[in-house]
């Protein structure tokens, strides 16, 4: 009879352990996904602000070069050509410069046991 009580106690302990383990896993998943989500949103906000910065600095450079060259189109054509070259370089090297580091950062963030970093 004592063995029956020990088996029931062991079964209850196992059920309790599984429930707690499930809850801990669920909380860790929520913590990691919220960390990844907040990083993505903050990255989008910073990216949005940087796009505005680049837009206005490009306008300023375009106007400045146009004034220096005495041609209202030349400054903007030079600025556009510069961005075309940057775009072409990024297009040709996007795997090594953008995709692989971004994928590695997402994986590192998802698997990191301390999501605050």
Image (cartoon, helix red, strand yellow):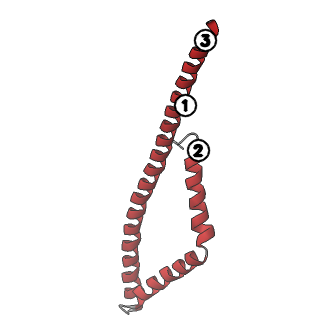
Provide the secondary structure element on which disc 2 rests.
Answer: loop
Label 2, label 3: how many angstroms apart (C-alpha)?
Answer: 43 Å
Label 3, label 1: how many angstroms apart (C-alpha)?
Answer: 25 Å
Query: In percent of the image, x 61 and y 16: which residue is there?
Result: 7
Image location of residue 41, percent across then percent down: 41, 54
Count residues near mark 3 (Cα–Cα under 10 Å), then give few for <14, some for 14-19, many for 20+. Answer: few
Q: Mark 3 points at which residue?
A: 4
Looking at this view, name the residue that lies furthest to the top: 2
Provide the secondary structure element on which disc 3 rests.
Answer: helix
Mark number for residue 21?
Answer: 1
Mark number for residue 61?
Answer: none
Provide the secondary structure element on which disc 1 rests.
Answer: helix
Q: Judge from the rendering whether residue 71 lies leftward or rightward of residue 20; answer left or right.
A: left
Count residues near mark 1 (Cα–Cα under 10 Å), then give few for <14, some for 14-19, many for 20+. Answer: few
Query: In percent of the image, x 39 and y 63: which residue is there?
Result: 48
Looking at this view, name the residue that lies furthest to the bottom: 71
Please count the marks in the image. Answer: 3
Query: In percent of the image, x 38 and y 73: which residue is there?
Result: 55
Q: Where on the picture, by quarter, is residue 100?
A: bottom right
Callout in the foreground (1, 2): 1
Q: Where on the picture, by quarter, is residue 101?
A: bottom right
Image location of residue 84, percent across then percent down: 50, 82
Q: Name the residue under label 2.
A: 112
- Quadrant, the N terminus: top right
Mark before the other along the chain sequence, 2 or 3: 3
Label 1, label 2: how many angstroms apart (C-alpha)?
Answer: 19 Å
């Amino acid at each position: 009879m004592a063995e029956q009580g020990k088996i029931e106690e062991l079964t209850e302990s196992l059920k309790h352990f599984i429930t707690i383990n499930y809850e801990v896993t669920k909380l860790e998943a929520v913590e990691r996904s919220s960390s990844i989500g907040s990083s993505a949103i903050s990255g989008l906000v910073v990216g949005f602000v940087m796009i505005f910065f680049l837009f206005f600095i490009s306008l300023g450079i375009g106007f400045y070069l146009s004034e220096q060259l005495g041609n209202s189109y030349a400054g903007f054509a030079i600025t556009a050509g510069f961005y075309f070259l940057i775009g072409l370089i990024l297009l040709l090297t996007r795997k090594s410069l953008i995709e692989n580091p971004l994928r590695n950062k997402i994986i590192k963030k998802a698997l990191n046991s301390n999501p605050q970093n």
